[in-house]
Image: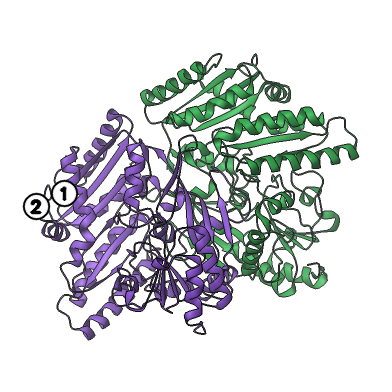
Chain colours: A green, B purple
Amino acid sequence: MSNYKKIDVKDIEFLKGVVSDKNIFTGEDISEDYSHDELGGISNYPEVLVKVHSTKEVSKIMKYAHENVIPIVARGSGTGLVGASVPLHGGIMIDLTEMNKILELDKENLTLTVEPGVLLMEIGKYVEDQDFFYPPDPGEKSATIGGNISTNAGGMRAVKYGVTRDYVRGLEVVLPNGEILNLGGKVVKNSSGYSIKDLIVGSEGTLGIVTKAILKLLPLPKKSVSVLIPFENLEKAIDTVPKIIKSKAIPTAIEFMEREVILAAEEFLGKKFPDNSSDAYLLLTFDGNSKAQVENDYSKVADLCLKEGALDAFIVDTDERKEAVWSARGAFLEAISATTPEMDECDVVVPRNNVAEFIKYTHKLAKDFNIRIPSFGHAGDGNLHVYICKDKLDKEDWETKLKEVFGCMYKKSEELKGLVSGEHGIGYAKREFMFNQYGDEYMILMKNIKLAFDSKNILNPGKVCQ
Amino acid sequence: MSNYKKIDVKDIEFLKGVVSDKNIFTGEDISEDYSHDELGGISNYPEVLVKVHSTKEVSKIMKYAHENVIPIVARGSGTGLVGASVPLHGGIMIDLTEMNKILELDKENLTLTVEPGVLLMEIGKYVEDQDFFYPPDPGEKSATIGGNISTNAGGMRAVKYGVTRDYVRGLEVVLPNGEILNLGGKVVKNSSGYSIKDLIVGSEGTLGIVTKAILKLLPLPKKSVSVLIPFENLEKAIDTVPKIIKSKAIPTAIEFMEREVILAAEEFLGKKFPDNSSDAYLLLTFDGNSKAQVENDYSKVADLCLKEGALDAFIVDTDERKEAVWSARGAFLEAISATTPEMDECDVVVPRNNVAEFIKYTHKLAKDFNIRIPSFGHAGDGNLHVYICKDKLDKEDWETKLKEVFGCMYKKSEELKGLVSGEHGIGYAKREFMFNQYGDEYMILMKNIKLAFDSKNILNPGKVCQ
């Protein structure tokens, strides 16, 4: 594993033949940012950082790294939460953020072709300005689309619209040996051999480097309304969600939030949330093409919630109110982070009707371990974001408790037929939990697949299945 | 490749220890049906046929076959069109049609859990009776769901709802070494390692045997209306489709059909189609939850078509008319088949705005080669079903012309950024065309993936990438 070649002068010379000098960084010229992502506790510098601007450059560098057995890691905005883009073994880091062109909006095929460094927020703005819609909506809008594809990012609208995978029609990928493959395309159906495209999606930069993506778009829904529904407590709120699903309404999003997290967001943003008088809230969105239809949908669900014990139902339909609610929702992670010197997160996904039980269990853990565990997340799709906060614990206590609490949580998630990660991925941090859940045979198969792509194990080694 | 162990008395004894005697067939007791699927020209008998009734049985047989290097092929209804379930090397055939139980409808998670032998028509009826909806809608309703998953079947509703892959939440799979894996589950999101589930979907029984599936359901749309729109000729009809897509309408289905095919269906079914006076038709469906919305959608599109030169627009909203139109549509394949002693089909998928050019090209080929090439298909998703008919040609002429015509068609499809198969798969028949398009590096990767699952190459050898 560690018989990788160290970068030397000859390698730098090679790189200078591929990209211009100003795009090559070594030693102290490499910004600290590149040594980690948003996961605390794990960092390492690449030996050389290369900013690339074309698929050809990526291909040449990969081919060279393959021939010389040099580890290589691709990086976008570095907003990952599981250490997937940390260059554990040094080597070459390829920075794709300057491959950031939107290449084509094809209105007849409803596709958008982009380079991997385009930011999620840029895609949203670009297509919505032209009345199109790219549904995946993760909270972190400054992530690159390449990063979103690599983690199969989900976001708020998965209840109705699905996740990133569902919007990737085609990919251009550079394999670990430098070969360039085109997978899928603008086609809507495809039964032409194994779906390598779907294997690349969610592979966290371990099987190939995405250098171009063809995304599926939808027409922009004409009308969208959110409803904020306060409840006495979180259990009551979440218990209502399977009933909403069972009622056959299809909200775009169903988020749950606790007062503690809302207060943290108010503090963090210096802005008021429309209401913070209740302990827990559901925030739902409904979209569609006619006002009547959307109104019908949300009033049915609001009535159901009131019948189930909701305290009120606030319609969020002005731009101002929408901004207040959704900017708070978007800031939850950072807001919690600002309340504690360190934290780690659990991103499990469970069947929707088990969300309440899981959250109850985290409350029990908080009591049992005397540790703060705020949470928020996607009640409508069963994907929870649960934060274990260090607060005033000393290092040793913190590490012990964190390990124990994580152990309990992932065990509970497995009991509830959940999986380790809903949308943040496995990366470096969650491998152990995935290994435990999947067992040897499953992991051997994943390792075999990794070898099928990367016989020399040079691409992002030490991640996901290793 | 051909060093497979032949079945002997000892093997039969082993099988008798796994399933009861009445579920084991050898020699003349094996029905001719099991030697082929719906593809003409390729057939072979298994050495032994085993009807299985549980995952454990499949696992035990696979483990034994793995240890003894015996080839093994899984079979559902045998409705495939590319020879994927023909046991080229003899060995064991596992018949899954009696693993046909619907195991659970989970209304809170909107999932249906089924065994692989359940028929597509049974799933449709079962869920619709309870006001749920399983959108994938291939013409062949007597296919098993296991077969649909293995080919990533598409069907008519892919325009709005996507294909089988989009509705597979979880799979239980028996690997070639007999190990049983559970992939995915009832969860809506999943970023927990490589998506092996998505690799199994569409792998045509070469990577593992699906023994259980958890399918995603939707609430059944309350209202559905079809519109039959006649045009002067097929080019005019198909040229309208990208304009419909561009108008941001989202029909459930957009099918195209020619008069010749309609007449064949009338003859075949002994039933009249609502109109056969025009040369070409588009058949569109719109669905939704309110009458007003559906009417608004279809009248906008009907107006657009009339503006683009359509001759009329027949609303198909009574049960009787719907039955007449869609039963004809469902019978097209068999109807064409009944007009010729032999035929072969091309199932390419191209970007939606290239459908017209492809169809024009097939008309040119029909003229140039003096051969009949009727077609129909999914104009809304770019997936075409094009039939080359032998008619009165002698064997030699037929084989030569077929090869040449196929060569031209797949070349054209590649030029138009299409792919070899939209929904019928590669199986045995289309390997050459996929190899030609994908090239060596792509095929090596697929072969490596096959080896990652099946180191002894016992599972359905000679298919897809081999």
Categorize mark 2 by other alpha carbons within 10 Å: few (<14), some (14-19), many (20+).
Answer: few
Q: Quadrant of residue B124?
A: top left
Residue plotted at (54% across, 33% down): A380
Q: Residue B309: x and y, percent?
A: 18, 47
Q: Secondary structure at mark 1?
A: strand
Return the residue at label 1.
Answer: B230
Residue type, mark 2 in image: Ser
Identify the disc placed on residue A203.
none
Where is residue B99 shown, x and y percent of the image? 42, 56
Residue nearest the observer in this picture, A341 or A417 = A417
The secondary element bearing badge 2 is classed as: loop
Can you tell which mark lies on residue B277?
Answer: 2
> Which x, y percent locates residue A392?
87, 30
Q: Looking at the picture, does residue A351 appear above or below residue B236?
A: above
Work out whether residue B87 can be spotted: yes
In the displayed structure image, the side of residue A82 where residue A275 appears, left or right: left
So how many labels did they put on this image?
2
Which residue: 80% across, 71% down? A5
Nearer to us in this view, A361 or A258: A361
Give yes or no for contact between labels 1 and 2 (Cβ–Cβ under 8 Å): yes
Of the image marks 1 and 2, the number of the one nearer the N terminus: 1
Q: Is residue A339 visible?
A: no
- B189 left or right of B348 in image: right
The amino acid type found where label 1 is placed reads Pro
Read off the chain for label 1. Answer: B
Q: CA distance from mark 1 to mark 2?
A: 8 Å
